[in-house]
Image: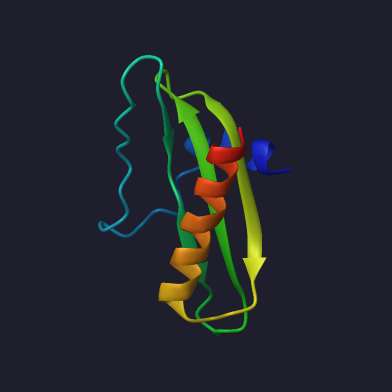
Amino acid sequence: HSAREFSILPYNLSFASSPSVCLDWTPPPNSFVKLNCDGSIMTNGHLAGFGCPIRDSNGAWVMGCSGCVKDTNIVRCELMAIWHGLNLAWNQ
């Protein structure tokens, strides 16, 4: 399901109403991939998760991971995202 969600994201950016949301992505050099990691906590503080897509130099989705986080501390949530993303990349 993660691949499907990442594939529809560029076509459905109407939710990105905040000017602080970055809609620009710089691809990595040829023969490299780029790992992006993000953790997020819902405003009610009861739901937290992360997503880590890996894309190639053409911007094509290569692989990724996502998950829920029990801890609702934003710093630990972001660090969990980085850990899972690096672990995925390293194992591949």
Residue 50 appears in which quarter of the rendering?
bottom right
- 26 relative to 90, above or below: above
Q: What colour scheme was applied to this rendering of the protein?
A: rainbow
The image position of residue 87, as x and y in percent, is 56, 48
Looking at the image, the residue that sits furthest to the right is 1
Q: Quadrant of residue 68?
A: bottom right
Q: Is residue 67 left or right of residue 74?
A: right
Residue sitting at x 35%, y 14%: 30
16 left or right of 50 in image:
left
Q: Residue 21 versus residue 37: which sits nearer the camera?
A: 37
Can you tell which quarter of the image residue 62 is in?
top right
Q: As drawn, is 10 to the left or to the right of 32?
A: right
Furthest residue in direction top, as rendered: 30
Quadrant of the snapshot with the N terminus: top right
Q: Position of residue 74 (x, y in %)?
A: 44, 75
Depicted 44 relative to depicted 10: above or below: below
Quarter that holds the C terminus:
top right
Front-lying residue, 13 or 33: 33
Name the residue at 40% across, 53% down.
Answer: 16
Q: Nearer the viewer, residue 14 or 47?
A: 47
- In terms of depth relative to the viewer, which is nearer, 21 or 30? 30
Q: Residue at horizontal 48%, vertical 35%?
A: 10
Query: x and y percent of residue 71 in the render?
Result: 58, 80
